[in-house]
Amino acid sequence: MNFWWIINLPFLLDALFAAALGVLLFSRVKEPRTLWLLRGYLFLVSLAWFVQRFATLPITSKLIDALVLACSLSLAILWQGELRRLMELLGTGRLAVLLGNTQKEFQANTSTVTQLSEAAGILSQKRRGALIVLDMGSDLRPEDFLYSGVPIDAKFSTELLLNLFASDTPLHDGAVVIKGNKIISAGVILPLSRQSISRYGTRHLAALGITERFDRCICVVVSEETGTLSLANLGRLERPITSSRLLDLLKEFMSSSSSGISTTKTSKNSSSSSVSSTKSLAYNFKEEKSKLNSDLFPEQK
């Protein structure tokens, strides 16, 4: 019995490590289409391993290996941004971000979210262009931006945010990065989206670009042309929204980021998520109508 365990120990370790890597990958993937691609790729890899180990089919084995290689190259091209992000996290040793553990420094309180919604509503009424990035656990670093901006490192407040986006200040054209309850930096230049959406201005493309690269990052946009309020998440833009709708969405994101802390909070988050999903379904009818106006009157800034 002990002899059999020694012989099969490498096989057991191999299966254990492969299962742990598969669980990690599936837990980090949120988009359904990406999940389907990953499932298909892992199926091909498993099939190639099974044929090579348990079947003497040299031609079939060569064909499957060639197919796995072609799929690997295709996925490397499709996921070049995600693979770059993975290598950055491994190189900098930020394993907590890679494993999906949200640290306390990223947890904004209710007061910060409320003040942010109020400030966004004021900016929208005054038609002041604004771009606000909320780091919900991606651990954004200066090297993640085209220009890291000016360090602020101050406690968040509505008055400070309004002053940063005043039209006569040198930092109003860039983005403000918020982590937890602090404003980290201002005047930040974000990478633009890879999507070719002509009806969106520079601010909206920057919001889509940063949320495409980082899944635990949301971005609030205020249009300078029309004062329209928008929210970007996972490379998608929800617009137009009101300040009260923005507050509901921010609370939903805040609760989902801290859902693993206790079972009580998890139950509350699931109930609030179901309510917000119902609201979003009802809101999609208004959004479809607003898209017609946005196509006819594209924003330039």
Image (tube, helix red, strand yellow):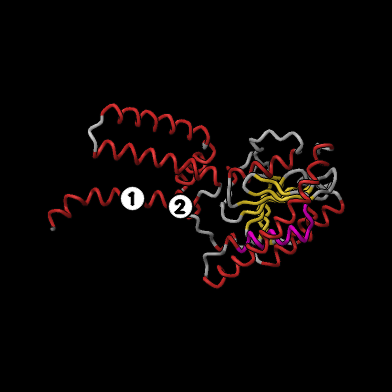
Callout 1 amino acid? Phe
Left or right: 71 with respect to 145? Answer: left
* Magenta stretch: includes residue 247: yes
Main SS of the magenta segment?
Answer: helix
Please rate how many residues cluster around mark 1, counting C-alpha atoms within 10 Å: few if below 14, some from 14 to 19, many from 20.
few
The magenta-colored residue range is 241-255
Label 2 secondary element? helix
In the image, taking residue 183 as reference, residue 28 lies left or right, namely left
* Residue at the extreme right of the image, as rendered: 126
Residue of label 1: 17
Task: In this rendered view, identify the residue nearer to me: 275 or 126.
Answer: 275
Q: In the drawing, what numbered circle is on residue 95?
A: 2
Q: Residue at x 40, y 42 (%)?
A: 42
Which of the labelled discs sits on residue 246, or is there none? none
Q: Earlier in the sequence, mark 1 or mark 2?
A: 1
Instruction: Report if residue 80 lies within the magenta region.
Output: no
Quadrant showing the N terminus: bottom left
**Identity of the amino acid at label 2?**
Leu
Q: Is residue 233 above or below residue 81?
A: below
Tell whether label 2 touches label 1 (CB within 8 Å). Answer: no
Q: Look at the picture and state if 22 lies above or below 110.
A: above
Secondary structure category for the residue under label 1:
helix
Which quadrant would the C terminus be assigned to in this image?
Answer: top right
